[in-house]
Amino acid sequence: MESIIYIIRHGITKGNQKRWYYGASDISLSPQGRRELELIARDNPYPVEDDYSFFTSGLSRTKETLEILFGDRNSTEIKDLNEMNFGSFEMHTYEELEDDPEFKKWVFDETWDVSSPGGESRNEFHRRVSRGAKELFKLHGERVKKSDRSEEVCSIAVLHGGVIAAILGEYFPDRGKTWWDLIPPPGSGYKLTMKTDENGTVPVAFEVMDYRPKDAGYDKGSPSDKAPIIKLEGLVKTFKSKSDTVQALKGIDLSIYKGEIFGIIGLSGAGKSTIVRCMNLLERPTSGRVMVDGVDMMSLSKKELNLKRREIAMIFQQFNLLMQRNCLENICFPLEIAGVSGAEAISRAKQLLEVVELSDKAKAYPSQLSGGQKQRIAIARALATNPKVLLCDEATSALDPKTTRAILSLLKRINEEYGITIVVITHEMSVIQQICHTVAIIDNGVIAETGPVTEIFANPQTEAAKKLVFPGRTMTTTYSAKRLVRMVFDGRSTFEPVISNMIMACGEPVNIMYANVQNIDGVSVGQMIIQLSEDRKAADKQLEFLKSQGIKFDEIEEVGIDV
């Protein structure tokens, strides 16, 4: 007897957006993931009847996906179909782990027998999934045997991308596809034709189901599997005058991935505004390449470039609103240029006023708005053409701290709900800390350092990074003393009584010169400047204690203003 099982991949999570390994972690869907599934559910592509059976893994994101696509349904949970357990690599990106010898041993293991620390090997994962698949097929087959042979029996299973690939790879090994090729987009999957006889129930054929929304933008789970939406290669920009030549950018190489908030920070004159204006070719580079979503921007004609720029919106420090137009008309302006009808443009503008929480200001003029309200209207105008990328050039520099936090929170919400890639140009580390996933530090026209914000904050490698990260600019006094140590606490150790424990263990006091805790991308990261004992042996003992506790630290000579 033949029957059908639909296996569907769950929606994207914050883990996808952060490019984490997060298999066994019970992470919920992101706002963007829920929105993409709702778009699929609106079109109702999957057949469903009251007598269908539903299955999920033991992780909540499969149940959330089931509810969005099919409503409130009773489902059978099969924990052997949970995603792979990455152990200590969970909640970390490939970039964070690539220098870890244990990670290298695991990720490059061709035998599939090496386990991640505290996790499982690929072979262990595949054996577990095989058990889970057999349980799923058995339960489905029992319904088939009990059914009226005139009706086709159907089941729906919402599972994880890696699990789906493992099932397809086991039962259809001769299809010539790699494991990664078999992972479907979120909300999509495979229609399995099942055969039930005296030997059991097995899949005998499959059909691909790809229902992803247009321009949804997903990745397949691997942090290194995603192509950058913006890629700068060997970018050089030189400004010439009659008396002088200035090289603002000196061979910039940079990759920015879809869905992330990427910060570019540097001191005045470092070249950060020039680099962002080169991304949409407001400034044409002297040499190098600018790739946006796979398109070489410098190869486009003027007409093609203008069309492509609709995908790359920009907001500025001074808002650049049209003073003779009210807020609604300002938002409609780019839609008018794009040839959108008046009624459609007005409808879109009203939606965007709701997004930026200024519906009551539709008829107000820029002169009647505060600075924060002007920037909100500028953001709404930038979103009018549904861009893939939003460039923010010092967008909060003219605002007070409270308004700055509100605008940054709005940008973060837009990123999460709409999946728009945001590039933030700033000279303020606090801006980077509040919303960015990744940061590049530019110094004198070159990229000095780039990486996850938490990593750069905790362990800056270059002098340019240390100038921006070290606490000197937040202190009112310069301190110079012997045996000064800067300690950095990550999210696991921020609230542990390290200083008290060190005093008790070493029998020597310490002098706390400075302390601060920041929330960076949802993780509490703290730093503290302490002065150790003046006795060398006692100070060495204190340093050994810090090492034994896994606390990152640097010995410094001075801390304070501009140090």
Image (cartoon, rainbow, N blue to C red):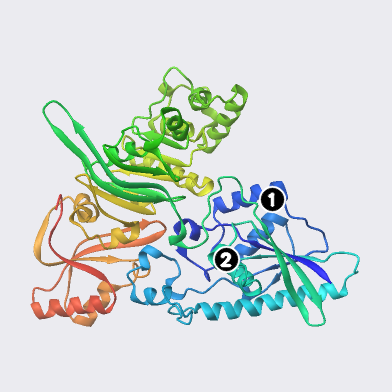
253 is higher (above) or lower (below) than 141: above
The residue closer to the viewer here, 556 or 136, is 136
Report whether residue 394 is seen.
no
**How far across and down, in percent of the image, does residue 433 sit?**
34, 52
The residue closer to the viewer here, 296 or 514, is 296
Q: Amino acid at mark 1?
A: Ala
Q: Going by the image, does 407 lie left or right of 74?
A: left
Q: Going by the image, does 399 lie left or right of 553?
A: right
Mark toward the start of the polypeptide (1 vs 2): 1
Residue carrying label 1: 41
Please tell me which residue is depicted at 17% across the width and 50% down the height of the picture: 476
Secondary structure of the residue carrying tag 1 is helix
Residue carrying label 2: 177
**How far across and down, in percent of the image, does residue 279 sit?**
36, 39
Q: Quadrant of residue 101?
A: bottom left
Quarter placement of the N terminus: bottom right
Q: Quadrant of residue 238?
A: top left
| Viewer-nearest of discs 1 and 2 | 2
Q: Quadrant of residue 393?
A: top left
**How far across and down, in percent of the image, does residue 390 sit?**
43, 40
